[in-house]
Structure formats: C-alpha cells, structure tokens
Image (tube, rainbow, N blue to C red):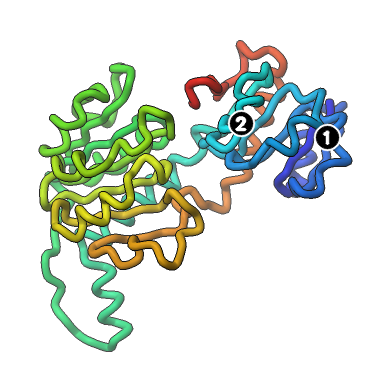
Amino acid sequence: MNILSLHPLRDAQIEKIRAACPYAEIHTAKASDCAPYLTDTEILLAFGQTNLAPILPHAPKLRWVQALTAGVDGFIALDAFRQSDILLTNVRGIHGIPIAEHVLGMILCRTRGLLTAHDNQKARQWKGLRGLDELYGKTAAIFGLGSVGSVIAKRLKAMGMTVYGVKQTMNAEPDVDRLFPPDALYDLLPTVDFVIVTLPLTPETKNLFSKKAFEAMKPSSFFINVSRGPVVNEADLVEALRKGDIGGAALDVFCEEPLPADSPLWDAPNLLITPHHAATSPLYMERAIQVFIDNLKAFPDTAKMKNIIDKKRGY
C-alpha cells in the first residue's frame, strides 16, 4: 500500500500509520514536489482545498483520497475527480471543540464589550462599557447541525440559551430545543438573537445568506459564519452592517483568502474578523490522523469506513 501525504507528518504519526498497516510505504511531499511518488500512490492525504488537477493524471493507481479537513470543495471542483471512482473521505468530527470555543469567544466579545475594553486599555483610557448584555435567555439558531453545530449547541445550552437547529434530517438533537427544515429560513431568522452558520458549501448553500436574509433578521441580531465564505454574500453583509439591518457579525471564513487588503469587510462596522483559524488547535493533526488510521484499518471495506463523501452532493 503506497500512501502519500501532501502535509508533513511527525515520526510518531508515521509510526501510528505503520502500526495500522505494516506493509505501507509512506511518503510525504509538498504538492509541488510530489511527482516522483504519484505513479505508485494508492492513498493520498491532503487538505481539502488542494488542486488535484496537476496530480490526478499522474496517479493511475489512486484509489482513495483522505481530506485532512472537513471541507472538500477544492477536490470536488475538479470534474475528473468528482466523476471518478476514487473514494473520498474527510475528517468530519474533529473540529467541534475548537470551533465551538471560537464561536463562544466571538459571542462573548460582542455581549461583554471585550474588544472595546481592549482598545481602551491600549489607549490607557478608563471608560465605562456600554451596551453589555447576557447570553442567558437569548436565542440562537444554528444552520447546519453536523458534528460542529452539535458541539456549538451544547456550549450555548450551558450558557442558558434557547437553541434552534436547522438541518435536512429531523432526528433528535439532545442540546437543541427545536429543529427546523432548511425551507424555514425566513420564518426563523426574525425570531433569534444569534445566527450561526456551520453549513457545507453546496450549490444550495452558496449565497444563502444575502440581502433578503439579513433584512429578515432582528436589527440587534449577531451573525457568525465559521463554515465556508461563499455561503455569505459579503457585499450584502457589508451593506447590512452599514445600514444597521443587523447589530453585528463575526467571520472566520471568506470568499477569497487571504482577505485582500482592499476588501470592504475590513472597514465594515461591528464586524469581527479572524483569519480562518476557528478550527486551529495543537490537537488538530493528531485527531485527523486518527480518523485516517481508523479508516485505513477497514479499507477497502467501505461499509466499515466513516466520513465517506458523496462527491456529487459535496458532503
């Protein structure tokens, strides 16, 4: 079994992979330097935004791509890969803890005036903080109740909030007070204080949050996106913030990354920007490699593997 990782692996991680598959040949290389290994590569590990176009034609034995991310939009953007029989899996399930903590931090920055307090500190000014609020008793709607959304729901319930969830399948969620189908978007938005987006990027979700959605929200509502940038129409969000259609927003993901210096988002009022770091954690790769190892032990028996992606649906 020939395994190629386009991301560096620690010696301990390589040994764990070998323990799961003793006959594996394991190589690591940057995408720009991987050509010598492609002819024999059967399993490829890479982040989900990797462009497979220069790789796929030179990897005739490739049977399985393991995304080291939850998002796989970079892979499935390539028609040749999407239409192939090559198996695709991701590491869905490892991001919940850091992203939920990041979302909670974004919310607390808003409700407790922490960014203003920090600015005052840097200016050596002792000023009272206005507009402080509590999370207790507030209502949040989480759009996309997968592994990340479910952990966010748990954290928000612990803060005494009412939590609504929007998902395709109406199966029970232990930390969600009420579930809604996707077509309830415009009925739900006017009723909640916080709108949190953890949706995958699909043709159905692209630009889902645009002018109509922002106008439907409470003027005091706070919008958070930790999923994929194109789920949001950024120009419409800037307009909504400037007009006061919503009270504020926090973005960790963007249509173009890095965010260009001339993007109007930088100057939008009441907007908190973080550089696609919500899932960052010192435990990230350990968790990702463990998902891969669990699947490697089962491969090629797909019935026993998890996180298999329907390439046509995108998730």
Q: Residue, x 25% and y 81% (percent of image)?
A: 120
Please tell me how crowded label 1 is: few (under 14), some (14-19), or many (20+) other residues with Cα within 10 Å: many
On residue 78, which mark appears?
2
Is residue 151 visible in the rendered image? The answer is no
Which of the two residues, 188 or 186, is positioned nearer the viewer here?
186
Precedes in sequence: disc 1 or disc 2: 1
Tell us which disc is closer to us: 1 or 2. 2
At label 2, the amino acid type is Leu
On residue 38, which mark appears?
1
Which of the two residues, 142 or 78, is positioned nearer the viewer here?
78
**Which image quadrant: the N terminus?**
top right
Quarter occupied by residue 247 = bottom left
Q: Residue, x 47% and y 52% (percent of image)?
A: 256
Q: Residue, x 78% and y 41% (percent of image)?
A: 14
Vertical order, 182 against 224 (above or below)? above
Q: Are marks 1 and 2 in contact (CB under 8 Å)?
A: no
Vertical order, 315 against 270 (above or below)? above
Quarter occupied by residue 54 = top right
Percent position of residue 143, x then y? 30, 34
Percent position of residue 16, x then y? 75, 37
Is residue 68 visible in the rendered image? The answer is yes
How far, Cα to Cα, is label 1 from label 2? 18 Å
